[in-house]
Image: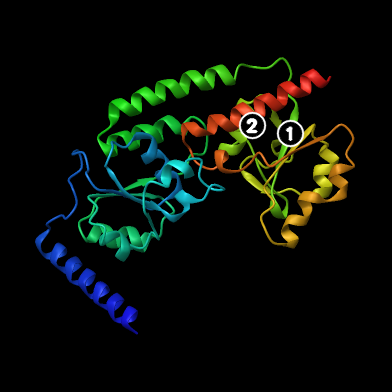
Amino acid sequence: MRGCVRLSRIISLLAALVLTGAATGGPVGAAAGTAPKRVVSINLCTDQLALLLAAPGQIVSLSHLSHDPDSSSMAEAAQAYPTNGSGAEEVYLLSPDLVLAGTFTASATVRMLRDLGIRVELFAPARSLEDIPERMAQMGAALGRAPEAEAQIARFHADLARLSAPPARRPRAALYYVNGYTTGDRTLAGDILRAAGFDNVATEAGLEQGGTLALEQLILLAPEVIVSGRDYPGQARAEEVLTHPALHALTGTRIAGTLTDRDWICGTPLVLSAVQKMRDLRLSLEVKK
């Protein structure tokens, strides 16, 4: 009961502040163009971009997923920061002058924070490797850390060029997740696969962005490599397709296992780890032949 009363008081306070802000036009957060001092991230990918670029003491809180090693490539570094549940009320009480969010963050949350005068910077998910320098530059500008972002962007371009030199032969591969879902060339995961020197059989099946690829169709496509999603704890029929005997009966196909995890999710320079692993896999196929 006490918790309900406290929450109602917070909501009442927020409502009053929204009305006050609307009446006076006075912002609470720092103005755009000034380096923020209290940054709160409520999105997994902005967590990692902020960790890569923020100045010491600039980050106040990260999203709860930042501490999950299965989701975040920077879970260890994130342990130094408290987490939040991404709710507007909780975020407001942290007194941020900048909130970092994704374009898929609940619109009501973003609207309430902005109505309270708090600056919210929205980041779209990366759809390709080319998007990553743009996200880095955006974060650098938001944090007042443009020179640091430029340095990391230059390093990203150099490392990507080294890892994605055109191969003599491009093996055919499939990315295969629960429920038979796959991703094509017009996705970040598909672009990682392309950069590592593979052709994506999803494109052959007409799935340039992604969609369901029936097990029977995957068998007929007979890729040289199948990279499967992680089998999470517990049991679900949606995951049965990943261990179906028909996959292991394919001759000439290597089941690469769970390489499609945290390094494939967010548009940061950390995706180069996934490119490196897939490139190493491709080179191992050449040695085998």
Measured as percent of width and height from the top left, residue 60 is found at: 30, 49
The answer to whether 267 appears left or right of 6 in the picture is: right
Locate residue 285, reporting x and y percent.
77, 24
**Residue bearing mark 2:** 193
**Residue in front for this viewpoint, 186 or 196:** 196
Residue occupied by mark 1:
173
- Element at label 1: strand
Give the quadrant of residue 283. top right
Residue 105's mark? none
Picture residue at 22% right of the left edge, 44% below the top = 37
Q: Is residue 275 above or below residue 184?
A: above
Q: On the rendered structure, is 264 left or right of 197?
A: left
Q: What residue lies at 39% left-to-right and 35% top-to-bottom?
A: 52
Q: Quadrant of the N terminus?
A: bottom left
Q: Is residue 92 above or below residue 204?
A: below
Query: Are the residues flagged by discs 1 and 2 in contact, CB closer than 8 Å?
Result: yes
At label 2, the amino acid type is: Leu
Q: Residue at x 64, y 17 (%)?
A: 166
Q: Is residue 169 left or right of residue 26?
A: right
Give residue 133's position: percent from left, percent from top: 42, 29
Residue density around tag 2, few if under 14, some if 14–19, many if 20 or more, within 10 Å: many
**Residue 159 visible in the shown view:** yes
List the single residue furthest toward the left.
24
Question: Looking at the rendering, which quadrant does residue 185 occupy?
Answer: top right
- Amino acid under disc 1: Ala
Q: As rendered, which of 142 and 259 lies closer to the eye? A: 259
Question: Badge 1 local density, few (<14 within 10 Å), some, or many (20+)?
Answer: many
Q: Is residue 137 left or right of residue 158?
A: left
* In the rendered image, the vertical position of residue 98 relative to residue 283, given as above or below: below
From this viewpoint, is residue 187 visible?
Answer: no
Give the mark nearest the N terminus, 1 or 2: 1
